[in-house]
Amino acid sequence: LGITVALQPVILRAPTAGVVSGINLQAGDKVRKGETVAYLYNREIQAAEQGLKIARQLDRKDAGALAKSVDRYAHPRGIPIVSPQSGIVTSPPVADGQEVSYLQPIVTLINPRDIYVQASVPLENSAVIERGMRVEITSPLKPGLRMPGRVAAILPVVNTASATSQVRIDFTGPARILQAGAPVEAHVITKSVPQATVIPAIALFQNAGKGY
């Protein structure tokens, strides 16, 4: 048994404290690399702009230097928050108009192609599992579908409470799960016999306790 895990989620954080504007994303939406997902209006810049208005009323000549400083850091719509890579929004982002603090997460993205399976293996079976072994993956999210994979790593972690160890399994085909946190079952193929004759278990019977 296991769950799907995102290899390296991308978290877009607030570059400064301020108010988020122009965001129109929901969980599951696709985001392209280089896409501006929101704008952040800095409270300090807003205060500086208000101060500039007052300075211009008091002394237009001296307000020129202040105006240059404000223009250097101000953006008409705010500071753009740009995605460095393509991905899918994993959870509801912050709301439009929400005030955020410095480095607060705005949007979290994952690349569906980076999804892998982290599975628990009973300790008595872990000794026969090796890297590179083929795996068949099933999940309630895709009923009736067997997705190919392979054992990518055997993690040096043992859960003494459940007497299991952890393995990482990568999808190897186009059929895969694109969501993190999905429950799965992984069937590791430790040995295979080419062109074997397969007999259903129901067709077997025991001969006087000696064999089948």
Image (spheres, helix red, strand yellow):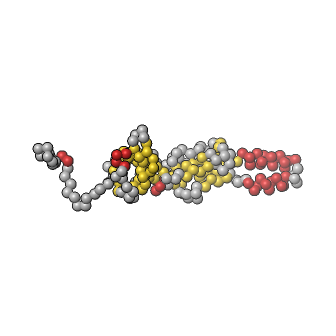
- Residue 46 falls left or right of residue 33: right
Q: x%, y% of residue 8?
A: 52, 53
- On-image quarter of the N terminus: top left
Residue at the limit of the structure toward the bottom, as seen here? 194
Which residue is depicted at the point 68% across and 51% down? 78
Q: x%, y% of residue 212?
A: 15, 48
Observer-nearest of 207 and 63: 207
Which residue is depicted at the point 80% across and 56% down? 68
Could you tell me if residue 178 is visible in this image? no
Could you tell me if residue 95 is visible in this image? yes
Observer-nearest of 198 and 138: 198
- Residue 28 falls left or right of residue 165: right
Q: x%, y% of residue 152?
A: 42, 56
Q: Is residue 195 above or below residue 48?
A: below
Which residue is depicted at the point 84% across and 48% down? 55
- Residue 133 falls left or right of residue 70: left
Which residue is depicted at the point 60% across and 47% down? 106
Observer-nearest of 161 and 91: 161
